[in-house]
Amino acid sequence: MSGLWLLADSRLPTGGHAHSGGIEAAVRRGLVSAPDDVAAWLSGRVPTAGLVTAAASAAACSLAAPGSGRLALSVDSMGQKRPSPELRGPVDWARWDASVSARIPVAALREASRAQGRAMLRTVRAAWPDAAIGGLGARPHQALVLGVAVTAAGGTPHDAAALAVHHLVGQVCSAAVRLLGLDPLALAGVHARALDEHVGVVDRAAEAGARAAARDDPDHLPSATTPLPEVLAVLHARSEGALFAS
């Protein structure tokens, strides 16, 4: 449990402090200026990008767990394919990484995800040397690393989904304080209410991620997007003088 608290701590050096969850581009264009605007931004972003990230984290947590529910297929004497738990092999993380990429339609956001994944990977190596990070690659998506870290910390796929949403909401609220000089207490309230409002998103993500992992099929991960933040991400990547990388 203490490891999960550590993963939830914004002071954990995972690179998240360098990213705004996309809100800086909205602030610079006058689309967000008050706590209510931040809440509105989150109400569109959490059920879409948040759902995708949380489900991928839940799947990675399930895949990395010893004795996970992934089922290989064997052929019986009648030529029928049947699930064969004893034939579980190593996780093909490249397939899952590619599937996460396919669900992030903007190159700038894919780069942000990988930058945060690489930073989190360094932290996981230091905090949990025995974590099953082999095969993730040098620059994996942040969602996959988070899921593996949750497994190493003794958490569940639901914990991984909840932490993914918590990190997204925390990035946005923290960035809003720095960008707009808003009352930190007001944004803490936005953060708490957003987590309460989107409990259902966490539940759906955990279920979808665990199901995809059990079938060893990343195509079962959800796919949802929000066009405006993605367009703004492209503009932000081309801008100069930005405070945050994304």
Image (cartoon, grey):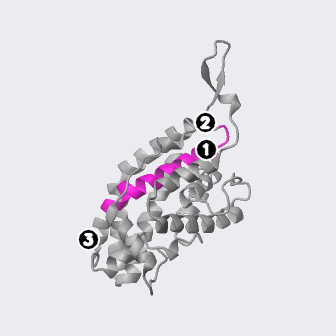
The local secondary structure at tag 2 comes to loop
Residue at 70% from the left image edge and 62% from the top image edge: 125
SS assignment for the magenta stretch, majority: helix
Marks 3, 1: nearer the viewer: 1
Q: Quadrant location of residue 32? A: bottom left
Q: Label 2 is placed on what type of residue? A: Arg
Sequence order check, earlier mark of 3 and 1: 3
Q: Which mark is residue 36?
A: 3
The residue at the far right in this view is 129
| Residue bounds of the magenta highlight | 43-67
* 32 over 155 or under it: above or below: below
Give the side of residue 138 with respect to residue 166, left or right. right
Per the image, the residue denoted by label 1 is 63
Most foreground residue, 61 or 212: 212
Residue that badge 2 annotates:
70
Secondary structure under tag 1 reads helix
Distance Cα–Cα, label 1 vs label 2:
7 Å
Q: Residue at x 48, y 58 (%)?
A: 164
C-alpha span from label 3 to label 2 = 43 Å
Gap in angstroms between the C-alphas marked 3 and 1: 38 Å
Q: Decide which of tag 3 and tag 2 comes sooner along the chain.
A: 3
Image position, residue 99 (x, y; %): 52, 50
Residue kind at label 3, given as amino acid type: Asp
Q: Are marks 1 and 2 in contact (CB under 8 Å)?
A: yes
